[in-house]
Amino acid sequence: MLPNGFRVGGICSGIAKKNEKKDLALFVSDSPASAAGIFTKNVVKAAPVLIDIERLKKGDKFFGIIANSGCANACTGIEGEEDAKNMCLIVEKSFNFDRGSVLCASTGVIGQHLNISRGKLERSIDLLKSSIGISVESENDAVLAIMTTDTFVKKTDKKIKFENGEVKIWGCIKGAGMIHPNMCGLSTNLHATMLSFILTDAEIESETLQKVLENSSEKSFNCVSVDGDTSTNDTVIVLANGQSGTGKLSGSDLEKFEKVFDELALELAQSVAKDGEGATKFIEIEVRNTKTEIDAKLIASTIATSPLFKTAMFGADANWGRILAAAGRSGVMFNLSKVDIYIGGVQTFKNGKVLDFSEAEARKSLLKKEVKIVIDFKAGKENSKYYTCDFSYDYVKINGSYRS
Amino acid sequence: MLPNGFRVGGICSGIAKKNEKKDLALFVSDSPASAAGIFTKNVVKAAPVLIDIERLKKGDKFFGIIANSGCANACTGIEGEEDAKNMCLIVEKSFNFDRGSVLCASTGVIGQHLNISRGKLERSIDLLKSSIGISVESENDAVLAIMTTDTFVKKTDKKIKFENGEVKIWGCIKGAGMIHPNMCGLSTNLHATMLSFILTDAEIESETLQKVLENSSEKSFNCVSVDGDTSTNDTVIVLANGQSGTGKLSGSDLEKFEKVFDELALELAQSVAKDGEGATKFIEIEVRNTKTEIDAKLIASTIATSPLFKTAMFGADANWGRILAAAGRSGVMFNLSKVDIYIGGVQTFKNGKVLDFSEAEARKSLLKKEVKIVIDFKAGKENSKYYTCDFSYDYVKINGSYRS
């Protein structure tokens, strides 16, 4: 269920996809909203990413997000930036929003230009304007319009009860390939194609919202990998329009909001790994008891991106040696004689030695849709979780001919 | 053709492979040889790697290398180290070589122990001793006995003419998966399963030989990737027995030797990418004109390990956007508006803009067995080349069930 004051929708415009599928989505608030965003750290940033960073740095109040799928509008030069600005401008004009108050996002093939002939974008926005709404159908249309190789609609919502009312948060996400988000805020050097839009009727300042998003992403969006390839377009935008009527969030109320926001972000991020290109199973990698959190995350992400580990998971092969080999090349130093490994609840390795475990039992657990891998270093107190999927024939099939 | 004084061979011993294929190789010199070695930097190092590092640090003269395939003897604890030492000891006893003068190497499944029952290793070494020789058949037997998923014998030799005679260099290599060598010498922190053994009758001190090998590996062994997974066992060992009779190499003679050694190392390294698991084509990635050599190598290796780039290559899809996206996530900063990209001789991108190139022509070049990718940053004068292969259905097939 959408938060108060938001309307969303999605249509087939033909500006980015050729196959008559939905390719243009709109998310609008009927009152000005605070905004926060995190973007890809890839040196090669798509036009919409550059535009959004500029707008979020300047502005404080925003009314919406226009997003397309099928064309990434990346590596498209000045012309691409003009196209992205135009998408925003036409929405602003149509709804009579302030100039610079609409954000944008794109996903799809790199290097192609949006197919915008005279008047085509205007007609598309008109159509979008008349079709947006607050129904579940509108939600689905919006999410469908940002999907590329995704196989299902990924969205979720939460409610938070306060003494004087209720705050709603709604989020959607797309992403199946070129997924290894490495995003940060506006102050530093930025890098993903994961697109996620989160809408809430909480009242919260942009600066606070940005902190909530950045903290949250380190345990959600930035902890998911399908193929290790960080996109030129990764974008997460949050809009908060304050229409819940519960007043500005602070203190313990803000903490309560943050907790639920974190849950929503994690759910969205996990859904991307579940829908990874060609994925047959979802894999959670938990690294336990390292000296630093960075160590834990580095080891977890190295395992999550190892083609040998991921193909073994596809084959339901409890090849714990590949887990160790990946950890060993992560750049983190550790004492092998302290390491324990669990594959789907079956311990295969203890204190640096292989156990006489049941291959049949391990295989059984690896044939499930969700698999958990634990590697314990017993070297400190820091932990990290990372989410990924297996590497199948279908990944090769999908990506051997993505542009054709 | 083997250098003077060396004999090699390979047999089926059953200590490491179950399928009656050759699994035990021996390389011996009939006079003491200088030795050099580089080994995996993976924190998790196989038993033979640990033994070799210790021996090369202590000793100065070596007589041979005993190597097996099928079992990596990695993550096998003290017992594994005893097995590795025993392999060496039995060779030393059998040939009456000094204790500690034989090196060892293993490749195969991690975590399994060598299948050595009482007397089995002794009988195998007896058999090996009687079968080693200098013929092409002996060379082939030795290489076959170190192969795992390799599909062809990879060996080469060179001759260098000097005023007072001729020096021969012979090298072999195995490796098809878990290939992303990151090796270094003995003085620093070490990490690969690429095995390569190089034999020469040049007269050259161990210290000099080590330098020649380390310098060479930065443009050969450490510039090849099949899947980005650095093994626990990567090993390159060079033995130089001085039997050419041309005297100790120095000055311009040493330079001449180095040049030919580099050519041989590069040829061996490239052959691994050509035989990459499931590979349908060999890919050379050349990064031109970066500010530093490290920049060039980092960009080249990021492209070479990108699953999206490698699946596009499998599909003969000139998806230059994926090349740029990988470069952009490499960690190197660059100015996109200066970048040029060539795919198989077809320029697709110039000064940050896509060209109106012929997709048909690009596809034609990508259907060849050997493909060259060039990306020019026009930011400096440093260059780097990296060698890899495409990512096919067969890679997934081979690695979905490697242990079974």
Image (cartoon, coloured by chain):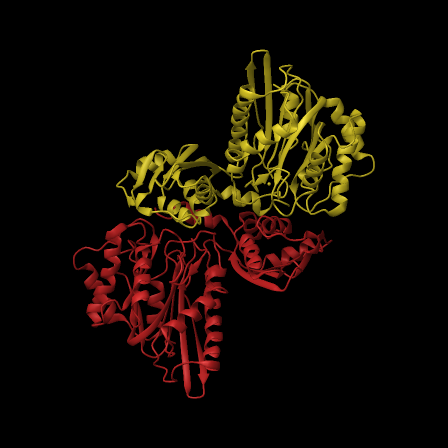
Chain colours: A red, B yellow
Q: How many marks?
A: 0
In the image, is residue A93 above or below residue B333?
Answer: below
Q: Is residue A14 visible?
A: no
In the image, is residue A195 above or below residue A258?
Answer: above
For the residue pair B221 and A208, the one nearer the viewer reads as A208
Query: Which image quarter is the N terminus of chain B in?
Result: top right
Find the residue positioned furthest to the top.
B164
Find the residue positioned furthest to the front.
B251
Q: Is residue B244 visible?
A: yes
Q: How far from the left and from the top, in percent, is residue A94?
A: 20, 69
- Left or right of A388 on screen, residue A353: right
Indicate the quadrant where residue A154 lies: bottom left
The residue positioned 68% from the left and 52% from the top of the image is A336
The residue positioned 63% from the left and 51% from the top of the image is A324
Indicate the quadrant where residue B151 lies: top right
Q: How far from the left and from the top, in percent, is residue B14?
A: 73, 35
Q: How far from the left and from the top, in percent, is residue A358?
A: 70, 55
Q: How far from the left and from the top, in percent, is residue B144?
A: 63, 29
The residue positioned 55% from the left and 19% from the top of the image is B253
For the residue pair A264 and A60, the one nearer the viewer reads as A60
Find the residue positioned furthest to the left.
A118
Query: Which image quarter is the C terminus of chain B in?
Result: top right
- Left or right of B306 on screen, residue B141: right
- Left or right of B148 on screen, residue A32: left
For the residue pair B32 and A231, the one nearer the viewer reads as B32
- Left or right of A178 on screen, residue A82: left
Find the residue positioned furthest to the right.
B118
